[in-house]
Amino acid sequence: MPQLVRYFIVHGAIGAGMSLAAIAILFVYNLGDIRSLVLSSAANLFAFGALVLVLATIFAAVQISMFVMLQPWDKD
């Protein structure tokens, strides 16, 4: 596997882990009544899955883009 692909996978996993930590904080402290909304909805598993999918995608994309932009570059 090329090194760059491995870095993308690692940093994407780091971003997804950070999103899970953010979701845990949202649910533990019930910020914005998100826990109450998800648990009271008829499709609570779908709502939770959608929240995890969207936030994991956003956090992973931000983490990967930060990794790419912070790489040193040569002035060739």
Image (tube, helix red, strand yellow):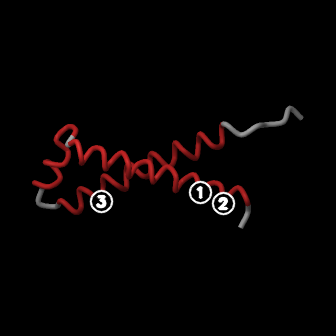
Q: Residue at x 18, y 49 (%)?
A: 35
User: Which label belongs to residue 6?
Assistant: 2
The Cα–Cα distance between marks 2 and 1, rounded to whole angstroms, is 6 Å
Residue 56 locus on image (x, y percent): 42, 52
Q: Residue at x 44, y 48 (%)?
A: 18
**Front-most of residues 65 and 21:** 21
Tag 1: amino acid: Val
Q: Are marks 2 and 1 in contact (CB under 8 Å)?
A: yes
Q: Residue at x 36, y 45 (%)?
A: 22
Dot 1 alpha-carbon crowd within 10 angstroms: few under 14, some 14 to 19, many 20 or more: some
The Cα–Cα distance between marks 2 and 3, rounded to whole angstroms, is 26 Å
Residue 55 locus on image (x, y percent): 38, 48
Residue with the most extreme front position: 28
Residue 65 locus on image (x, y percent): 59, 42
- Residue at mark 3: 49
Dot 3 alpha-carbon crowd within 10 angstroms: few under 14, some 14 to 19, many 20 or more: few
- Residue at mark 1: 10
| Image quarter hosting the N terminus | bottom right
Q: Earlier in the sequence, mark 3 or mark 1?
A: 1
Q: Residue at x 79, y 37 (%)?
A: 73
- Horizontal placement of 16 versus 37: left or right? right
Q: Are marks 2 and 3 in contact (CB under 8 Å)?
A: no
**Front-most of residues 72 and 75:** 72
Tag 2: amino acid: Arg
Q: Secondary structure at mark 1?
A: helix
- Horizontal placement of 39 versus 60: left or right? left
Q: Are marks 3 and 1 in contact (CB under 8 Å)?
A: no
| Image quarter hosting the C terminus | top right
